[in-house]
Image (cartoon, rainbow, N blue to C red):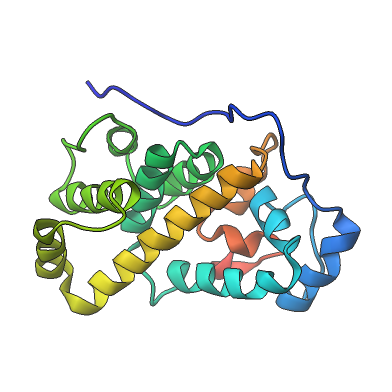
């Protein structure tokens, strides 16, 4: 039985307010080239749009990680959840546990990623990636043993991608916690997190649905 440590709420009282729709509408529409959909757009995307000129670069990076040349979808969500657990980042956990279910991770696997101590009881690839997440979150680097195992399991190019992706997930968790991006309280999560949360700001259709 796993002892869970799922982040559920912020302890802090002061928050960065979500930007007004009228402020972020031109930022979002300039990037996506389509009408902004406030009721579909996740709070994280709204908050990022409130950074103005930084928005395009951040969303480009997210799209690359979630795209076909990015990392394995199940591995990606594993890493995001383990980082969220390590950083006690409730918004990151809320969104990416939902995407994890959507990409096929089981409830048992998700529970393992939220456990105290080293992750066990799941596939060796998940165990290794969670260990890498723990080391990068806590020690800010990887041990030689972990890096050697990543290279052996995934190869040089994919190892670069995994380390880059985990680093971005750590940045995201810290940024979400720093801003206190409010948790989602509507059915937006299931509608907008089938695959890529960055695709939720505009109406999506077809296989690329956000």
Quadrant where the image shows the N terminus: top left
In the image, is residue 196 above or below residue 138? below
Q: Horizontal and vertical percent for residue 22?
A: 90, 60
Q: Is residue 3 above or below residue 63?
A: above
Q: Nearer the viewer, residue 38 or 159?
A: 159
Q: Quadrant of the C terminus?
A: bottom right
| Residue 197 spot, x, y in % from top left | 58, 57
Q: Quadrant of residue 28?
A: bottom right
Residue 160: horizontal and vertical position, in percent?
28, 73
| Horizontal side of residue 76 vs 188, given as left or right | left
Q: How many marks?
A: 0
Q: Position of residue 191 (x, y in %)?
A: 63, 49
Give the answer, above or below, for where 177 lies relative to 133.
above
Quarter of the image where one finds residue 146: bottom left
Side of 129 relative to 9 (left or right): left
Report whether 104 appears left or right of 151.
Answer: right
Residue under the image location 38 percent in, 77 percent down? 69
Above or below: residue 153 compared with residue 17: below
Question: Residue pushed farthest front?
Answer: 139
Q: Is residue 210 visible?
A: no
What residue is at 72 percent from the left and 74 percent from the top?
Answer: 53
The residue drawn where x is 84% and y is 65% is: 25
| In the image: residue 61, left or right of residue 131 | right
């Amino acid at each position: 039985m796993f002892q869970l440590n799922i982040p559920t709420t912020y302890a802090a009282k002061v928050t960065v307010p979500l930007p007004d729709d009228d402020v972020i509408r031109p930022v979002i529409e300039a990037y996506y080239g389509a009408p902004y959909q406030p009721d579909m757009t996740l709070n994280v995307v709204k908050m990022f749009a409130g950074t103005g000129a930084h928005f395009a670069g951040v969303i480009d990076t997210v799209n690359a990680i979630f795209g076909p040349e990015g990392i394995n979808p199940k591995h990606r969500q594993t890493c995001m959840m383990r980082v969220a657990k390590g950083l006690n980042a409730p918004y990151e956990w809320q969104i990416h546990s939902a995407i994890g279910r959507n990409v096929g991770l089981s409830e048992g696997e998700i529970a393992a990623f939220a456990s105290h101590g080293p992750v066990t009881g799941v596939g060796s690839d998940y165990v290794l990636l969670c260990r890498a997440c723990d080391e990068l979150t806590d020690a800010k680097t990887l041990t030689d043993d972990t890096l050697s195992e990543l290279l052996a399991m995934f190869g040089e190019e994919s190892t670069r991608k995994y380390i880059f992706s985990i680093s971005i997930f750590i940045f995201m968790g810290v940024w979400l916690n720093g801003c206190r991006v409010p948790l989602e309280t509507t059915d937006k999560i299931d509608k907008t997190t089938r695959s890529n949360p960055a695709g939720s700001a505009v109406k999506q259709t077809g296989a690329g649905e956000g």
